Amino acid sequence: MRKLILSSFKTAGIFLFFLSAACSVEAQEYATDRLFMKEFKKTKCLSLTEDKIKNMKIIRVITLEQEALLNQNVWSKLRLNLPLSPGEKKHLRKLKQKGVYSNKLSSKNIWAGKAAKFNALRLKCK
């Protein structure tokens, strides 16, 4: 009789343990949890995107204005018979071969293109 009661208590205890574990999993999830996870993913994506944008801003590209100043500097040094650096000599050879034509963009156009890229990256996170 005693063994029967103890075994039934054990079975009931095990059943209640599994039942309470299953109920507690359901009870822990709130509607706000899903919203929090969604916002957390969006925030994480935006922070990674901002880091990527910061790295893209650091990359330097020679602009049309800078190239014009470099050309002017090289020609001025030639007129005054001043010595040219190795980089300037290389640039002078390139100028003599190809001429003054340049396919560089102005800084305003470069930054407009970069701004469009940055906005496209940010929109991917929404």
Image (cartoon, rainbow, N blue to C red):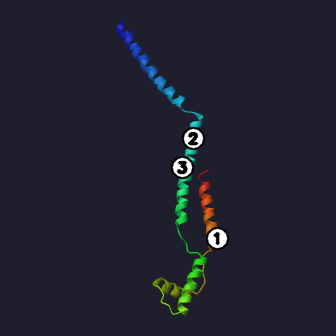
Residue 113 percent location from the top left of the image:
62, 66
Q: Check disc 1 and give the amino acid type.
A: Asn
For label 2, count other residues whose C-alpha is less than 10 Å away and answer few (under 14), some (14-19) or many (20+): few
Q: Please give the residue where the numbered disc 2 appears in the rendered image.
A: 36
Q: Secondary structure at mark 3?
A: helix
Which residue is under mark 1?
A: 109
Measured Cα–Cα span from mark 1 to mark 3? 30 Å
Q: Do we see residue 70 in this rendering?
A: yes
Front one among 124 and 74: 74
Q: Is 124 drawn above or below residue 77 in the view shown?
A: above
Residue at position x 55%, y 93% in the image: 79
Proximity of marks 1 and 3: CB atoms separated by less than 8 Å: no
Which quadrant, please, contains the N terminus?
A: top left
User: Which mark, residue 44?
Assistant: 3
> Crowding near pointer 1: few (<14 within 10 Å), some, many (20+)?
few
Q: Is residue 109 above or below residue 118?
A: below
Amino acid type assigned to the residue bearing label 2 in the image: Phe
Left or right, 24 with reference to 115: left
Residue 63: percent from left, percent from top: 59, 75
Q: Which residue does the image show at 51% across and 93% down from the upper left?
A: 81
Q: How many marks can you see? A: 3
Type of the residue with mark 3: Lys
In the image, is residue 10 above or below residue 66?
above
Kindly indicate the quadrant of the structure image that contains residue 108.
bottom right
**Along the line of sight, which residue is nearer the eye, 69 or 52?**
69
